[in-house]
Amino acid sequence: MTAQELVLIRKQLGLSQEALAESLGYSRNSVARWETNRRPIRALVALRMTQLLTEHLRKDADQP
């Protein structure tokens, strides 16, 4: 997952950096560093982001 993909997914989920950090168990500073390529995104974070996006898309699909 690239930094740009992380930003895109976070915005699609309607989350702030702080809200995303909380849901992943990281600090807002970590999210900011990932989004600006100052720190690599760990595989587990990318996996959890994928899970969050999938949950979000399923909820959207279930709404009439």
Image (tube, rainbow, N blue to C red):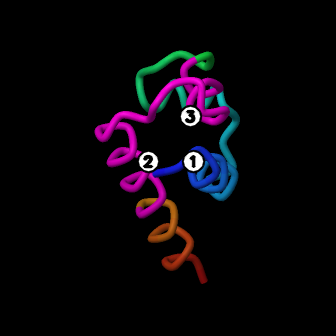
Where does residue 39 sit, x and y in percent of width and height?
51, 25
Q: Which residue is under mark 1?
A: 6
User: In the figure, is residue 41 to the left or right of 27?
Assistant: left
What kind of secondary structure does the magenta stretch mostly adopt?
helix
Q: Amino acid at mark 3?
A: Leu
Q: Which mark is residue 20?
A: 3
Check the image and report above or below for 39 versus 48: above
Where does residue 16 sit, x and y in percent of width and height?
70, 35
Residue in view at x 45 percent, y 51 percent:
1
Q: In this picture, which residue range is highlighted in magenta?
A: 30-54
Q: Nearer the viewer, residue 46 or 52?
A: 46
Nearest-to-viewer mark from 1 and 3 = 1
Residue in view at x 59 percent, y 44 percent:
3
Q: Are marks 2 and 1 in contact (CB under 8 Å)?
A: yes
Quick check: is 40 in the magenta stretch? yes
- CA gap between label 2 and label 1 equals 8 Å
Q: Secondary structure at mark 1?
A: helix
Q: Nearer the viewer, residue 54 or 6?
A: 6
Residue in view at x 61 percent, y 19 percent:
28
Q: Which residue is under mark 2?
A: 49
Q: Which of disc 1 and disc 2 is earlier in sequence?
A: 1
Q: Nearer the viewer, residue 33 or 55?
A: 33
Q: In which quadrant of the rendered view does residue 64 lie?
A: bottom right
Instruction: Classify 10 Å Cα crowding around label 2: few (below 14), some (14-19), many (20 and above).
Output: many
Nearest-to-viewer mark from 2 and 1 = 1
Check the image and report above or below for 32 versus 52: above
